[in-house]
């Protein structure tokens, strides 16, 4: 039987919903990804972020290769019920595949995108498999 | 002549990009909306959030009716160049059309979506026009 809280969600025409992941302590926005119904259901049952990878067309248990799991602290939905906000504990302090804390490391300054966040770990040492 | 920083952005198949707006002081995620190239360009030139309203299919200068303008403090883009993060000062302290501070006022608790943020202003008094 489907959980009732899943019913009111507005999925897009591909059956997906945008999901924003935010650090549960600092509020820093770490990344943005998509979920389908199965990944959202798994996110709740496992209490860790599970996304739907559009490029690979499969479930993506965040951290499955890198170990950089996102432990779920809080799940929110917006007024239109078509966007999710996850408050997470980012294991390893790295959310981005580039080895940075957040995916939003480029800032527009004087008309140019400028990287202002350091690589904390070399990606080649994160993804060894 | 098109600004160079606009060129590297990856728009979706509808010419849009997701945009997350976050309070510049507290980090609270206020809302999520979409931008097209024109609205993003206006966001920078006006230094206030201008979205693309998908439902109304027109430019949406946030606060144009409510007065709840979002002054831009910082614009970021993610590693894939397909999501924007705006750090804003929310004038009136209300981002949501329901009169709440943030659109993400429903939290999943014990398998139910529960509203945990107060209405700060009656929407009927916000939208008088």
Image: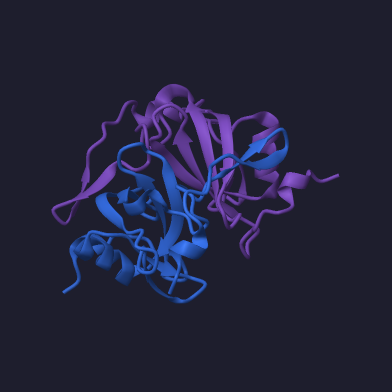
Chain colours: A blue, B purple
Number of marks drawn? 0
Residue farthest toward the left in the current orientation of the protein: B110
Residue A5 on image: x %, y %? 22, 60
Is B38 drawn above or below residue B117 in the view shown? below
Q: Where does the image place residue A1, in percent across and percent down from the top left? A: 16, 74
**Rendered view: B106 above or below A128:** above
Task: Tell me if B117 is positioned left or right of B81 in this view.
Answer: left
- Specify the quadrant of the image occupied by residue B96: top left
Residue B71 in view: yes
Q: Residue at position x 58%, y 56% from top? A: B82
- Give the residue displayed 45% in from the left and 52% down from the top: A31
Give the quadrant of the N terminus of chain B: top right
Q: Is residue A17 visible?
A: no
Point out residue B13 in the picture as x, y percentages from the top left corner: 63, 65
Q: Between residues A126 and A46, which one lies in front from this camera angle?
A: A126
| Residue A100 percent coordinates (x, y) | 49, 50
| Residue B71 position by quadrant | top right
Please tell me whether residue B26 is drawn above or below residue B1 in the rendered image: above
């Amino acid at each position: 039987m489907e959980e009732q809280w899943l019913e009111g969600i507005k999925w897009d025409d591909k059956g997906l919903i945008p999901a924003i992941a935010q650090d549960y302590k600092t509020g820093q926005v770490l990344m943005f990804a998509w979920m389908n119904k199965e990944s959202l259901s798994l996110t709740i049952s496992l209490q860790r972020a599970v996304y739907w990878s559009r490029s690979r067309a499969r479930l993506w248990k965040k951290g499955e290769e890198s170990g950089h799991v996102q432990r779920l602290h809080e799940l929110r939905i917006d007024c239109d019920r078509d966007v999710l906000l996850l408050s997470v504990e980012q294991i390893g302090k790295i959310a981005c595949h580039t080895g940075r804390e957040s995916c939003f490391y480029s800032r527009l300054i004087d008309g140019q995108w400028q990287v202002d966040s350091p690589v904390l770990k070399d990606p080649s040492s994160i993804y060894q498999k």
